[in-house]
Image (cartoon, grey):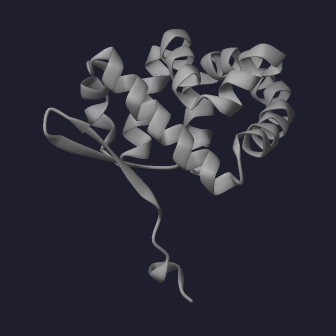
Amino acid sequence: MSLANILIPRDEVMFRGESLSFRGLSLNDFSTLMRGHMAELSKLFDMYDNVETRETAISQSANFAIKIVQEAPGMVAQLIVLASDSPQEHIEHAEKFPLPLQVECVRCIINLTFEEAGGAKKFLDSLMQMVTSLRPKAASEGLST
């Protein structure tokens, strides 16, 4: 099997009769998010560190999506652009999406990302380990926001 034959799973969110297509987040996507939104990611990881909000993230992606939209609206727009494979200049469109649409897009992206990773807990644990190992280095090099 070649890489060209592998289909990346996608899902759609409907808005006013139009379909928005998303895929799960890749390591490259998280790298982009870490470069531009480390402070917001830190807030989200702090929510994950809290047992009560971790359970929400794992069991109810819609509730976690709402928390993400509330805590990190700039990162949400970037996340939508990345997972839709849209050009970066479309970020202004994603920033202006109605709140319910942003929440539904994030929920869709979370589900696709976690599904590919073998579940939310496994994914978030792996990502937490990776980001924790990068945090001191990023801060010392002035890469955090």
Q: Position of residue 55 (x, y in %)?
A: 75, 24
Tell me the residue at 62%/41% (across/down): 31
Q: Seen in the image, is 30 located left or right of residue 17?
A: right
Q: Which residue is more in the foreground, 29 or 144? A: 29
Classify residue 51 by image quadrant: top right
Image: 109 above or below 34: below
Q: Residue pushed farthest top? A: 70
Q: In the image shown, does 58 or 22 lie closer to the viewer?
A: 58
Kindly give the residue lying farthest to the left in the view shown: 17
Report the residue at 16% width, 41% height from top: 18
Q: Position of residue 34 (x, y in %)?
A: 63, 31
Q: Does residue 113 appear in the picture of this structure? A: yes
Looking at the rendered image, the quarter that the N terminus falls into is bottom right
| Image location (x, y in percent) of residue 39 | 65, 16
Q: Quadrant of the C terminus?
A: top right
Q: What residue is drawn where x is 32% and y is 29%?
A: 91
For residue 116, what is the image quadrant?
Answer: bottom right
**Residue lying at the far bottom of the rendered structure:** 1
Q: Is residue 14 left or right of residue 80?
A: left
Residue 143 seen:
no
Looking at the image, residue 113 lies above or below residue 91: below
- Quadrant of the rendered image containing residue 136: top right
Q: Residue at x 71, y 19 (%)?
A: 42
Image position, residue 128 (x, y; %): 80, 34
The mark total stands at 0
